[in-house]
Image (cartoon, coloured by chain):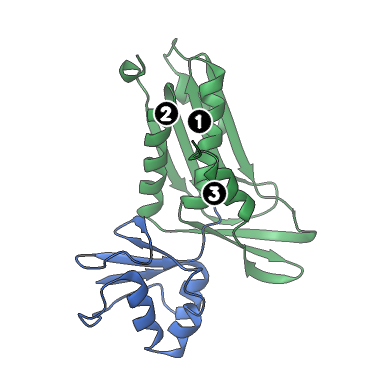
Amino acid sequence: MKVKYFAWVRERVGKAEETIEPPATVRTVAELIAWLSSQSEAYAYAFEKPKVIRAAIDHAHVKSDAAIAGAREIAFFPPMTGG
Amino acid sequence: MAASVTCPVTIRIQEADFDIARETALLTKSRTDIGAVVSFSGICRADEDSANIAALTLEHYPGMAEEEIKRHVDEAVSRWPLNGVTVIHRVGRFMPGENIVLVLTASQHRQAAFQAAEFLMDYLKTNAPFWKKEESEAGTGWVEAQARDDEAAARWTKP
């Protein structure tokens, strides 16, 4: 699946997007955050406060317990500050 | 009934500036059923928590930003009898005094236009995937989300 990062999450991860293949045991957004955090210090830094992180699956906001099965694109970003 | 009212919707995300008079004219052109147009424009401020802002950079999530704005415009159209909606959000780097966002709502009467414009702005601030980074004398950093913006959006869901 494709993963995108925005704002300071993007800066901390060090890339805007990538394609990942998490193990089948990773089923939810929260589990994906935990799995990514275990992959490198950059991810651990980006996701150090997982409750602050917002997520979207296929362009729609989701909560951290949302299932990632079938997702084409998952995005992680900080709370929004547009307008 | 509101269902038969024509409500053209324009949603644009762009780097270029917008012209409020031109957008308003486009919304009301050839229409005699519109009695009120409310216009909100958000402008880059020079002062944020007493720090002098030199510039503001707006980042967005292409694709989702348009879809998220559309979802809220659809909700506004279902809640109020609107005759037209325009939302333009700029991205890029802005100096104080420059336009950032425009919301136009047209209706037969002012109440619906006022309320829909406020509703759209409240949701735009908290739910549309845009992020501001500010440059000031104190340095460069991402703008933090404000609890008061969440509260402003939440009041539209209260019973």
Residue at the spot x=45%, y=80% of the render? A14
Q: Which one is in front, B71 or A29?
A: A29
According to the picture, the residue beneath numbered tag 2 turns out to be: B79
Per the image, label 2 sits on a secondary structure element best described as helix
Q: Numbered disc 3: what chain?
A: B
Query: Which residue, given by chain and number where applicable, does mark 3 sit on?
Result: B125
Q: Is residue B14 above or below residue B49?
A: above
State the hue of chain B: green
Above or below for A36 versus B34: below
Quadrant hosting residue B50: bottom right
- Residue A4 rendering spot, x and y as whole percentages: 36, 69
Label 1 crowd (10 A; few <14 / some 14-19 / many >=20): many
The location of residue A59, given as percent across then percent down, is 33, 56
Q: Which chain is blue?
A: A
Judge left or right: residue B45 versus residue A39: right
**Residue B38 image label:** none
Say which residue label 1 marks: B116
Position of B50 with respect to A83 (left or right) is: right
Residue A63 horizontal side relative to residue A80, left or right: left
Query: Disc 3 and disc 1: Cα gap in Å?
Result: 14 Å
Q: Earlier in the sequence, mark 2 or mark 1?
A: 2
Task: Tell me the subunit letter for badge 2.
Answer: B
